[in-house]
Structures are given as structure tokens and as C-alpha cells.
Image (tube, grey):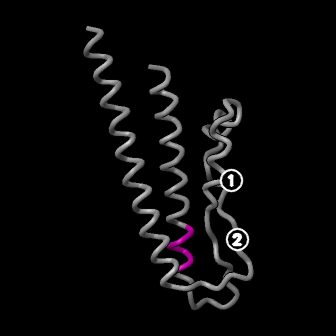
């Protein structure tokens, strides 16, 4: 069951990260015509690589993913690319919610079998 709790924490962090990326992408689209606006994005690989280390996972749970939005200087905002990234983000969110649902179902099963 502890494994399920660990997985639940990791999926929760992933969902938080997806939310941060959604905010960054939405901000990019909202500011597509703003002079001097710098494109922002979230690099999942940099952040998720730390989830294998127990200490870094605990720190990530406490601090959250708020610091992972990166400014991408020199990159122009292309609406079609941003919309495609939003769609990709939506698919990641769907996968994360399904995984969370599976974890909760597993935990319910363990609780009910243990009665």
C-alpha cells in the first residue's frame, strides 16, 4: 500500500506540473502580440528526473512545481505550436487522471479485502 501512496504523490506532482504548463502556454497565447513578451514553457524531463530520488521527491512535494516555468528567450510564439502543445498537455492530464483513478481503485480494493 505504501507503493500506492508513493505513486499517488508522484501523480499529484505530475498533475501540478501539467497545470503549471497549461498556465505558461495560456500566457503565451494571451501575449502573442505583446512586444517584448518572452515565451514560457515547462520542461518535464528536467523536473520529473528528480522523482526517482526519495529526498528530492520529498522536497518536490513540499515546494511544488512553481519554480519550473522557464523563459525561452529568442523563441517566437507560433500560435499553431502553442495550440498543439495545449492539446499534448490535455492528453497528459487525461493520462494522469486515469492513473490516479487506478491508484484509488487499487487502494479501495486493498481496504475492502482487508475487512
Q: Name the secondary structure under disc 2.
A: strand
Q: Residues within 10 Å of mark 2 (few under 14, many from 20)?
A: some
Kindly report which numbered mark, 2 or 1, lies closer to the viewer in this rendering. 1
Residue 3, position in %: x, y? 49, 24
Q: Is residue 81 above or below residue 96?
A: below
29 versus 103 height, above or below = below
Vertical placement of 63 versus 22: above or below?
above
The residue labelled by disc 1 is: 46
Labels 2 and 1: the sequence-earlier one = 1
The magenta span reads 24-29
Q: Provide the residue designation for mark 2.
A: 71
Across and down, in percent, residue 61 comes to 60, 38
State whether residue 42 is above or below residue 103.
Answer: below
Disc 2/disc 1 C-alpha distance (Å)? 14 Å
Quadrant housing the C terminus: top left
Q: Quadrant of residue 75?
A: bottom right
x 34%, y 45%: residue: 98
Residue 87: numbered disc: none
Q: In which quarter of the image is the N terminus?
A: top left
| Image position, residue 48 (x, y; %) | 62, 47
Amino acid at each position: 500500500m505504501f507503493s500506492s501512496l508513493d505513486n499517488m504523490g508522484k501523480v499529484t506532482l505530475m498533475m501540478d506540473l501539467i497545470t503549471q504548463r497549461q498556465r505558461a502556454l495560456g500566457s503565451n497565447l494571451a501575449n502573442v502580440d505583446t512586444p517584448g513578451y518572452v515565451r514560457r514553457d515547462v520542461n518535464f524531463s528536467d523536473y520529473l528526473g528528480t522523482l526517482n530520488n526519495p529526498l528530492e521527491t520529498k522536497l518536490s512535494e513540499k515546494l511544488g512545481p512553481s519554480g519550473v516555468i522557464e523563459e525561452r528567450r529568442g523563441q517566437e510564439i507560433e500560435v499553431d505550436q502553442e495550440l498543439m502543445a495545449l492539446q499534448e498537455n490535455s492528453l497528459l492530464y487525461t493520462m494522469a487522471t486515469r492513473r490516479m483513478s487506478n491508484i484509488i481503485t487499487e487502494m479501495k480494493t486493498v481496504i475492502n479485502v482487508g475487512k
